[in-house]
Amino acid sequence: MDRAIYTAMGAANAALNRQAVTANNLANVSTNGFRAQLTAYRAVPVNGPGDATRVLTTESTPYNDYTMGAVNQTGRSLDVALPQNGWLAVQLPDGGEAYTRDGNIEVDSEGQLRVRGYPLIGDGGPIAIPPQAQVTIAPDGSVTALGAGDEPTALALVGRLKTVTAQPYLLRNGDDGLFHVDPARQENPVLPADPELRLMPGALESSNVSPVKAMVEMISTARGFDMQMKVIAAVNENEKNANQLLSLS
């Protein structure tokens, strides 16, 4: 079989992977704090006998676009937006720690503060609040609760959110939608809390995905995939014609 088929097949496979990443970005246009995934590919020469006229396509290490999304005021006391390179720490089911920029905090049936179903980590572990209490989050991450029927002066401090500052190269996006410390960059999978980090209560950061740009990328990738399929079909047709000529001779 002609090597051109393998070359076109590699490019078509790269286009499929890029289309999957772009579709995932487009599906998360409305996800709070979402960071668009980036795809990178490079050409690699084919080593072996013959002229070095063909190259294969290989994926490079994927990263995310860490540009901040738009910050929108919601007025909800449990919503927080984070500054650039700021993250909220959440607890994983295995007891580990991961990070997110989604500040849409909820209170579960047991009174724990959660984001996307994961418990938020405080100074001493997950933060729980009294039943039917009014919760307020300060810019420094302090969580206060006011019980139902209590006087405004009866505010009680129930904990402080663990917020960390991490440069983009330290984190990698996981399949769970959370960011984890890259073991190739740092051995310790847990980042220290940053007491100087300041939150923006009553606001949420939107996704940094541009719907228009994502749609253009999907169309461009689909056309590239079609082009590779035409190359494979053309090479296959040439092989058939060559076989017919050889059989006649």
Image (tube, rainbow, N blue to C red):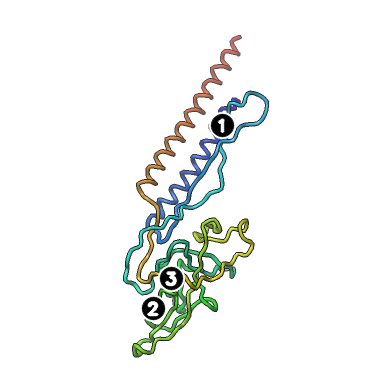
Task: Kindly identify which residue carries mark 2.
Answer: 136
Tell me residue 140's x, y (percent): 44, 75
Tell me residue 222's x, y (percent): 43, 38
Type of amino acid at the residue the image marks with label 1? Thr
Type of amino acid at the residue the image marks with label 2? Thr
For the point 54% across and 65% down, which residue is it? 98
Q: Earlier in the sequence, mark 3 or mark 2?
A: 2
With respect to residue 195, does 5 lie above or below?
Answer: above
Of residues 139 and 218, the one drawn nearer to the viewer in this rendering = 139
Task: Kindly identify which residue carries mark 3.
Answer: 198
Of residues 48 and 95, the one drawn nearer to the viewer in this rendering = 48
For the point 49% across and 39% down, which residue is it? 15
All told, the count of numbered labels is 3
Q: Nearer the viewer, mark 1 or mark 2?
A: 2
Q: Is residue 31 visible?
A: yes
Asked where in the image residue 170 lies, by quadrant, the reply is: bottom right
For the point 39% across and 79% down, which residue is it? 135
Q: Is residue 119 visible?
A: no
Q: Earlier in the sequence, mark 1 or mark 2?
A: 1
Crowding at mark 2 (Cα within 10 Å: few <14, some 14-19, many 20+): many
Label 2: state its secondary structure: strand
Tell me residue 44's x, y (percent): 59, 35
Asked where in the image residue 102 lies, by quadrant, the reply is: bottom left
* Marking on residue 225: none
With respect to residue 81, does 148 lie above or below?
Answer: below
Label 1: state its secondary structure: helix
Q: Earlier in the sequence, mark 1 or mark 3?
A: 1
Q: Nearer the viewer, mark 1 or mark 3?
A: 3
Type of amino acid at the residue the image marks with label 3? Arg
Asked where in the image residue 73 lies, by quadrant, the reply is: bottom left
Task: Kindly identify which residue carries mark 1.
Answer: 7
